[in-house]
Structures are given as structure tokens and as C-alpha cells.
Image: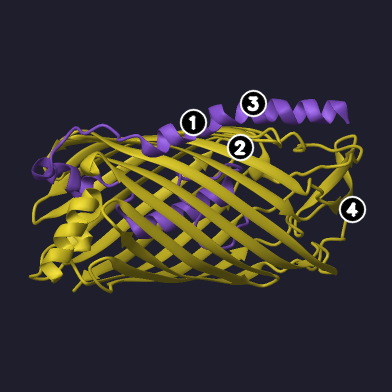
Chain colours: A purple, B yellow
Amino acid sequence: MTHRKRMGETATRRRPSWIAAICVVLVASGCATTDVASRDRLAAEAMAFDAHEGIRHLRLKIEAAREASLGGYGEASAGGCGCQ
Amino acid sequence: VRAGAAAVILLILPAQSASAVHPLEATLDFFGFVQDDDGGQALKAEGMRYVGARATARFILDATTDLETSVATSFLSNESAADLPGIDAITGASPRLLALDVSAGLSARRGEVWTLRPALVYHHQKGYVSEGVDIVVDRDLAGGDATLTAALNVRVAFLALETFRGRDAGTELAGTNALSVSWRQNVSTTLVTQVGAQYVRQDGYLGDSYNYVVLTSGGDPVAVTDETLPRVRQRGQLNGRVRWSLRPDAAAGADASWYFDDWAVRHFAFEPSLTWPLPGRGRVRGWWRVSNQEAAEHFRTEIQALGRFQTQDSDLGSFVTHSAGVVLVLPRGARARADEMELTLYGFTRDDGIRALGASTGVRRRW
């Protein structure tokens, strides 16, 4: 019982640092590097991370099936099967 | 009002603005994929044929809300099981599957910097039905130069199992919960980056009831039995992406991911790409991807005695994969940029002998 209480106290003491870290991320203002009028080249389709939806769908299916990884680079797995 | 809405979306989502100014956008794609088996697991036939079609539609409902829907269907034909000398137990596994994927979601702008994107997804195939919810939240920062995205994906699957011998093996449940976080940052007027992390936990039946393992003695197969895998899997992946504008409508890119899980699988992938404009406002994009995988701890190429878990699924093995593809985008008709046709050729080769070649064609129309 005493051991459990100490464990709980330790977790409580550590929690503020986690919360603070999450808050820092959430409220961070990011880095302002451009103004809206100068974003033409950033807005070009050539600059999109996933510009071609059809082949992206096929690739996620294949990579998720033929590899043991999640496939892709951060997208949710293709379709709704949830099998990968 | 429409122009005002478009201006707001242009300001908020600079990387997607080209499609956001149209109140309706629809796509239709057809896929074909052939996998050759000249290796992998030597005692299994792993060749397959895949054809599919996918349609999507995106409607701008009002100044702050889009509706996105998709329907995809696919037909998969697996090779029959390999002949195993002296063993005739593999008789009943269905080599053909028809699958359906449906999704519908909203993209709702809230205030100056928040976007909420909830969606429902449904998947159906023989012996496997799953339902799920996606919730994605975007927060724009630094006047649109950065975006913080958090996503939760929940899936529940209902399985009616059939063994590789064709026998009914009862029903099972499987659950998948995925959490991902990413940060996109404009570094300059010609450079954008994105970093992200994913965590996935899966519970329930995580094997493939058609998979079997072959016991051998002195190198000769003597018996086959079910694949057995743990009922929990925790997975993580770190991702990094960059796009560099070389000139208007031309860009170089690099993507990388590092994957790890508690089945001891490790997987690293790196993918450079190049997009270049073509005469007539078309463009071509090419990419090459190389990845290295370390096998799951329960993977065995040869099994002489059964343990608690074992699999011979070559997709859980060790291999290096090289894949490459090229997409040709061609504007159609007089309304350049509104109608586009895509042609894609794609293939991969694994150093354990699995190879595949795929192609797709699609059209995108904006109104």
C-alpha cells in the first residue's frame, strides 16, 4: 500500500512537466517565415506532399500489405479495414 | 460570397489552394497490379492480381465547410497454395476476394486557425467487415506558415475466420487505435517541411487465417499448421518530409520514415522525388523509394518444432525493397487546370524475390 502511494506521488510530481511540454507545443506560435502574398510557389501542386490521390491510395494499400510497417509518411492507412 | 470563401481557404491552406477554389471536385481512378512470386516464402505461392476503382467527390458546402466522400472497390485474386510434397491438407482457401471501402467526412473551419475533420469509414470483404471513425484537428500557426495536426483513427473489425484448409474457424474481433501528430512548417517562400509521429495499438486477432506454417524435418516438409501471432501489437513510426521549389511548378522532394514495433520489426524508408512541368501545363512526377526491413521475432524461414508463436508470412520477414514510379498529369480540354488526366506506372522489387508492377489511370474534374 505504501509502495503504491509512493508510486502515485511520483507520477503526480512528474505530470506538470508533461503538461507544460504539451502546452508549449500547443500554444507555440510557429515560425513566421513568409507573407501571404509570397506563397505562390508554396501553393503550387508540385509542392504538395500528396498531390496524386489515386496513386497514393494504391501505394498505401500495397505498402501496408507488402511491408510490416505502417506505410506512407504519416497518413492514415488506406481505406477502412484497419488491418494494418 | 464564393470568392470570399475561396480567399479564406487560400489564406489558410496554401498548399491545397488550387483545388479549394472550385465548389465541386471529383476524381475517378482505375488500378491494376500484378505481383510475381519468384521467392518470398519458398513453400507458399504468393503471386496475386489486383484490380480496383476509386471515386471521390469534394463539395464546398459553405464558406467554412467541405464534404468529402469516397467509394473504392477492388478484386484480388491470389495464386493457389503451393504444392507441398507428401502433404495434401491445403485444399480450401478461397483465392479470390472482392472488397469495398466507403468513407464520408467533413472539413469544417472554426474561427481563424482551427479546422476539424471528422470522417466515418467502412470496409467490407468476405469474412472481414470493419467500421471506424477518423477525427483530425488542424491548428494554423504563424499566419499560416505552420500547421499542427493531430489525428485519431479508430477501427473495429468483425472477422469470420476460414482456415487454409477451408474450414470455418469461428468469429473474432480486432481493434485498431491510431494517434498521429505532425507539424508542417514553411521554411521560406520555396521550402516546406513536415515532421510527424504515429502510434498504433492493435488488439484481437492479428493473424491471417489463410496463413500456414510448414514444419520440416531434414529440410523436407512433413506437416502444415496454423500461423499463430500475439493478440496485441504496439507500433510507432516517425516521419519527415521536405519539398523544395526549384522554379514555378517544379519541385524536388524527400520523404523518410522509421518504423518500430513490439514484434521487433524495424523498417526504414527513404524516398526522393522530382516534379517537373511539361509543355501545355502538364507535369510529370517521378519517385524512387528504398526501404529496409528487419524481421518480426516470430518469423521463421524454417520450423522444426512449434513454439508459442510462429509465422512464415514473408511480409513479416527481412528484406530490402526498391520501388519507383512515374505520374504523368495532362490537362484536358480548354479548361486547363480544371480537368486533368493522370497516368501512373509503378513497380517494386524485394530482394527476397517478390516483384510487382502496377498501373493506374484517373481523371480529376473541377466545377
Q: Would you say the residues marked 2 and 3 are in contact, meaning their CB atoms lie under 8 Å apart?
A: no
Question: Residue B106: percent from the left, percent from the top?
Answer: 39, 67
* Front position among marks 4 and 1: 1
Residue bearing the label numbered 2: B352
Tag 2's secondary structure?
loop
Q: Would you say the residues marked 4 and 1 are in contact, meaning their CB atoms lie under 8 Å apart?
A: no
Q: Spatial distance from mark 1 to mark 2, Cα to Cα?
A: 47 Å
Residue bearing the label numbered 3: A13
Q: Spatial distance from mark 4 to mark 2, Cα to Cα?
A: 26 Å
The kind of residue on which mark 4 rests is Gly
Q: Is residue B130 left or right of residue B239?
A: right
Q: Earlier in the sequence, mark 4 or mark 2?
A: 4
Residue bearing the label numbered 1: A20
Mark 4 crowdedness (10 Å alpha carbons): few <14, some 14-19, many ≥20: few
Q: Spatial distance from mark 4 to mark 3, Cα to Cα?
A: 65 Å
Q: Residue at x 34, y 56 (%)?
A: B115
Tag 3's secondary structure?
helix
The kind of residue on which mark 1 rests is Ala
The kind of residue on which mark 3 rests is Arg
Q: Spatial distance from mark 4 to mark 1, Cα to Cα?
A: 65 Å
Q: Spatial distance from mark 1 to mark 3, Cα to Cα?
A: 12 Å
